[in-house]
Image: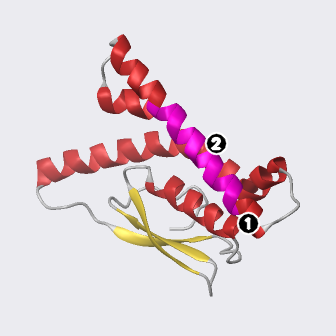
Amino acid sequence: MAFWFMLDDSPRPDELAVGAAASALAALLATVVSRKAFHATNPGHSDAAAGRQAVGAGWRREAVSLPGQVLRDTALVYVALGRMVARGGPPPDGYTEISLPYGDGSTQGVVRRVLLTWARSVAPNSFVVGMDPDRDVMIVHRLAVGAPEQDGKS
């Protein structure tokens, strides 16, 4: 719903109602799909176990740090934009590797990787370009190189 409000930027009640309906529908569909996928690969487990296994501690850490990462990256991109306007030329960009266990090929492993990829790509300064399962690293492109990543690897 917050994402809808950011995109729509209108406090009109009819538009807020549409945003709430779209959010509720998306949440319902996500729940149905994740339950079906979990039960198809793990018969006999409860829905609570599905949620715990699909998300995991790594995703929770990412979710908690996400607002700070978005604010920091937004500031970095604006500073880089200001320098680009003042000096001309694009800011220095680069790639970084973030240590991250790749996991297995189960539904939960795939969901975990998708959520972690989204969390690292939602901030404006970084975009996940791939994962290397052999070395257990996530490869991230950074638009403006300047501040170290959260985990200290740059």
Question: Which of the two residues, 71 or 27, is positioned nearer the viewer here?
Answer: 27
Do we see residue 1 in this rendering? Answer: no
Residue located beneath label 1 in the image: 40
The residue shown at (75%, 69%) is: 41
Q: Mark 2 against mark 1, which lies toward the viewer?
A: 1
60 sits to left or right of 124: right
Where's residue 93, x and y in %?
Answer: 31, 66
Q: Residue furthest bottom?
A: 134
Question: Callout 1: 10 Å neighbours few (<14), some, many (20+)?
Answer: few
The residue shown at (37%, 50%) is: 124
130 sits to left or right of 44: left
Q: Hey, what amino acid is under mark 2?
A: Val
Between marks 2 and 1, how big is the CA–CA gap? 30 Å
Q: Hey, what amino acid is under mark 1?
A: Ala
Prevailing secondary structure class for the magenta stretch in the rendered image? helix
The residue shown at (47%, 71%) is: 96
The residue shown at (41%, 72%) is: 95
Badge 2 or badge 1: first in the primary sequence: 1
Question: Callout 2: 10 Å neighbours few (<14), some, many (20+)?
Answer: few
Secondary structure under tag 1 reads helix
Image: magenta residue range: 22-37
**How does the figure colour the protein chain or chains?**
secondary structure
Where's residue 66, x and y in %?
Answer: 55, 45
